[in-house]
Amino acid sequence: MKINSLDNVIINLDNGHKVADKDIKKGESIIKYGFPIGLATEDIKKGDHVHSHNLRTGLKDHLEYEYNPAFNEIIKANDNRTFMGYVRKNGDIGIRNEVWIINTVGCVNKTAQRLSELTGAMYFPHPFGCSQLGDDHKLTQTILKGLVNHPNAAAVLVLGLGCENNHIGEFKKVLGVYDDKRVKFLNAQDSLDEIADGVKIINQLQEYAATFKRTPVSVSKLKLGLKCGGSDGFSGITANPLVGRVSDQLISYGGSCVLTEVPEMFGAEQILMDRCESKEVFDKTVRLINDFKDYFIQHNQVIYENPSPGNKEGGITTLEEKSLGYTQKGGRSIVTDVLDYGDVVSKKGLSLLNGPGNDIVAITNLAAAGVHLVLFTTGRGTPVGGPVPTIKISTNKELARRKSNWIDFDASLVLEGSPLIDELFDYIIEVANGTQTKNEINGYREISIFKDGVIL
């Protein structure tokens, strides 16, 4: 399958790996998606398999970037599409009406689990909140704050131990103003029976949650997170471009989309930079890229040591190749904002969010940023899910068939000429209306927080 008239490789439709479409000399660029994905390390004959044995990255550590704006305005939709959401008292919109238990510290994970089993409230175990210092400690608090404030939670029990760095008194300083009907607190060390007290508080929160009913809400209020898991050779052909088109469609309605996983922008970052709406947003994007490269360098790691073994098995060879496929999830929309780790999305359009590509960290990051659900493309498959609905979109038919208990939507029909844009957009509305994703059905809802600091 030829991707672009400029390409000198074609895709094997059986396994997603690359085959040379013409003779390629040692040192020449290998072209896919119309862009270089690396350099040939030896002479390659037409018909040869092109992969790690004869292709290497052509990327370097730090690059000079120029702002060359090149974007098309997304045409605004001319209808008033809605979904059935929950309007919160502060005006935020939720697509779920759950009660969440948010731990200030990992020491009460099992307490939270027990309370969840007794009440049906959702809990998200994590090992953080104590023995952390400086910015590392602040990151934990910031992400937990984002989860407490998430509108998919009608009400929240903040559960602490009492002696942790992030004890409830300190966390309240970070949380700021809150609705005491919606958010309640329990320190386990202060209670004679934390289980009984916790059940009583959660019952009160569930009564409060029951006061909210679904009502028609404009699609413009919807916020989508864009994420990819283990990729394969079809990721940049089926699922990722499909998500990009759906992202553009939501933005045409006035909605918001958030793209994270900064290391997977390396090699395709100029495409995003040229779509920045202003020089200010461009400069923020440059800092976003260079700061993450510096993070690698500070830890004596090779910036371009990616893709993962699973990616390579699926046909992805270099980071350029993965990144060029990855960026397609952002569609063609203008980049309107750049968010730091822990920031909450506030602008319409496409935002870039600082953070790593690790699946659970990235999903948690997106949830804390306020997205209602995550579109998660995968060529390898994973059961993982986060606090918000996580729609798994398979890049190939075999994965969708073999792991139907994980996969929500099969994008492989794109190879047969089916655009699937309306089908996926309709499914997103169904999920917003209450249809549960596979991660919700399976109970796979986890969180993890980006860590880069001292632990006592």
Image (cartoon, rainbow, N blue to C red):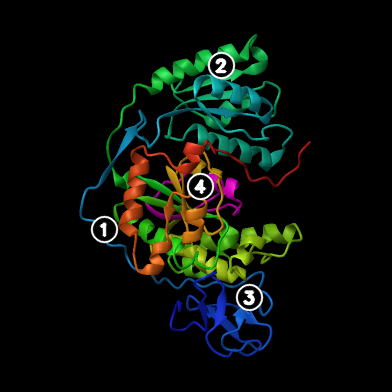
Q: CA distance from mark 4 to mark 2?
A: 32 Å
Please tell me whether residue 384 is drawn above or below residue 290 in the rendered image: above
Q: Residue 180 placed where, x, y %?
A: 46, 20
Quick one: quadrant of the C terminus?
top right
Q: Is residue 112 above or below residue 336?
A: above
* Image x and y of residue 340, in percent: 54, 50
Q: CA distance from mark 3 to mark 1?
A: 42 Å
Q: Which residue is mark 3?
A: 51
Query: Taking 67 as reference, is 420 above or below it?
Result: above
Distance in Å between CA atoms under marks 4 and 1:
34 Å
Q: Secondary structure at mark 1?
A: loop
Q: Position of residue 344 (x, y in %)?
A: 48, 43
Q: Which of these two is toward me, 26 or 262?
A: 26
- Magenta span: 339-363
Q: Callout 4: 10 Å neighbours few (<14), some, many (20+)?
A: many
Residue drawn at x 31%, y 51% as measured from the top left: 254
Residue 198's tag is: 2
- Indicate the secondary structure of the residue bearing disc 2: helix
Q: Nearer the viewer, residue 125 or 222?
A: 125
**Which residue type does callout 4 highlight?**
Trp
Residue extending farthest top: 192
Q: Secondary structure at mark 4?
A: loop
Packing grade of label 2 (10 A; few <14, some 14-19, many >=20) is: many
| Circle 1 residue | 76
Q: Which mark is residue 406?
A: 4
